[in-house]
Structure formats: structure tokens, C-alpha cells
Image (tube, rainbow, N blue to C red):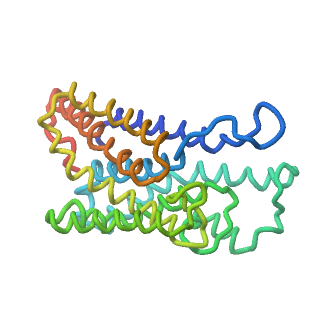
Amino acid sequence: MPADIRSLTGVRGVAAVLIVLYHFGNVPLLGPGTAPYYRVPHGYLAVDLFFMLSGYVMAYVYRDAFVASPWRHYADFLVKRVARLYPAYLVIAALYPIKILLGLSRDTLAYFRPWDWVGNLLMLTGWGLHVQPIVGVSWAASAELGSYLLLPLLLVVIIRRGPLLSVVGCALALAAVVGIAMSGLGSAGPLDVTNGDSMLPLLRAVAGFAIGLGIFRIAHYLDGLSMAMQDGLVAVLTLTIVGVGILVHHDLPIYLLSGSQDPVGGQAAVEAVQAQYERVGLTDVTAR
């Protein structure tokens, strides 16, 4: 297993903090009322950054994993992904009925149908199957799981075949993002589609995942840049994202700028890991 991509782990940490701040932006921590005490503009797009990061990392680790004995490797992959997502999800989901029973929620257990309980148990809240989520934000983990199910197909289209098919795949993913933004179903913004009654949350995740795969494919073109120049690009892109987030009201420019972070930080980390492996006598850390 390749070493951890630390720079992307840092990006994940920042994205996680942004998501927490975004969700608590309307919580009256300092007194009564519901007025927002702080606001993270377009904060929900940090979830899309997670989807793109997942695609990038999955390409880094699994790009050749399903070539030989594909079904066995696919089963092993799914077991690992479910083991990573499901335990934490199950613990959090189990706390919500307790919260309801203690009278700490406006919901009641009668509000959920038998299908809702089944769908929540199977992590289907983001697949457009009309499952009322017990945990409101569980759609993201559910949609991420859907992206994992499609990984072998997406790897063939975007990573393993010729550049034309890869361009077509990425263009379709971008078209899906634009279509979501134009759907008018976003809650806090054009891309903030979270309602499990439609397949748009799943499409949102799969599109971001596919874009992350495409970013991995072109990341090697940064090989010629020095580490200092790559670090400088990360800093410039970060400041640009912050500025655009403050000044621009539409999601798409920020979405695309966020994705541009992946090849810069990710390729620098891959090069560093490759150097470490070469020092101990190994050759290609990405050939998995």
C-alpha cells in the first residue's frame, strides 16, 4: 500500500473544518434567535472537494488493481471501503434514535417508515430511493459509496483507455455538474443538492469522483515544475478560491478552482513518496 499522501490529508482536514463551520453557521451559540454568527460562503462545496479528492486517491492506489482477477479484487476493494465508512456511520446513526427518544429532536420515531429504516441501515439515503435519512448529512457517505461501486468502470473510461475517451468521460462529468447547478434543486446554492428523493446527490458525487480521476491522469504534467513552484501554485490557488468565494455568488468557478488543488498538491506528494521508496530499494509506488 502506498504511503499516505500527506498534503492531500491536510486539504481534507481544512475541508472538514469548513464543513463543520458551514453547518454550525446558523446555530445560536451566543444567545437566542437564529441569526448567523458567522458564514462560510459556498461552504457546502467542501463536500465536492472531498469527492474529487477521493477520485484522485482511488486512482493513485487502485489504477491497476482490477486488471488481473477483477471480480476478486473488486470484492476485496468493496470490503475495505465499507469497513472504512460503515462503522462510523452506524455509530452516528444509532445515536439519532436515542436523541429522538430523549426528546432532543423535533422528529419522532413514527416519522420514519419501515423502508426508511432499511434504507438507512444499507446507506441508501443519497441514491434517489426516497429514503428519509435519520442523519441528515448521511447522503454524502451514501453517495460516496455509490462512487466506489462504479470505480472499475470509471477507471477504464478515464485512466486506462486513450485520451479521447478520458476527455469524453471528464466532459460528461463536468456537464453533469453544470446540469445539477441548473436544476434549481440546490438548497443553499446551485450545487447544494442533498434531497434523497432524486438521484442528483449521487450524480454530484460520481461527477466529482470522475473529475478527481481525470485530474490524476494529467497530474504528471507538473513533473517539470520545482517543489517551490508547486507550493507557490497551491498558495495562489488557495487565495484565489477565498477571493472568489467572497466576491462571486455562483458555485461553478469555486468548484473548478477547488479541483485544481488536487494535481498540484497530490503530484508533489507522489514525488516525495516515490523518492522515499527509491531510497529503500523500491521503484514505482504508483504502479498498483
Query: Number of numbered discs present?
Result: 0
Relative vertical location of residue 72 with respect to residue 230 in this rendering, above or below:
below
Q: Residue lying farthest front?
A: 247
Nearer-the-camera pick, 34 or 283: 34
Residue 9 percent location from the top left of the image: 40, 36
Farthest right residue in view: 103
Task: Give the quadrant of residue 168.
Answer: bottom left
Left/right placement of residue 26 relative to residue 22 reads right
Residue 130 x/y as whole percent: 63, 74
In the figure, is residue 284 to the left or right of 113?
left
Q: Position of residue 170 (x, y in %)?
A: 28, 62
**Identity of the residue drawn at 24% across and 67% down:** 157
Residue 188 placed where, x, y %? 59, 54
Relative vertical location of residue 140 with respect to residue 239 in this rendering, above or below: below
Q: Does 178 appear above or below 189? A: below
Task: Name the residue located 80 percent from the left edge and 68 percent from the top edge.
Answer: 111
Is 276 in front, or is 125?
A: 125
Q: Quadrant of residue 134?
A: bottom right
Q: Residue at x 32, y 32 (%)?
A: 236
Q: Quadrant of the N terminus?
A: top left
The residue sitting at 38% across, 59% down in the picture is 76
Relative depth, front residue between 152 and 166: 166
On the rendered structure, is 249 left or right of 222?
A: right
Which residue occupies the extreme left position in the image? 224
Q: Is residue 188 left or right of residue 245?
A: right
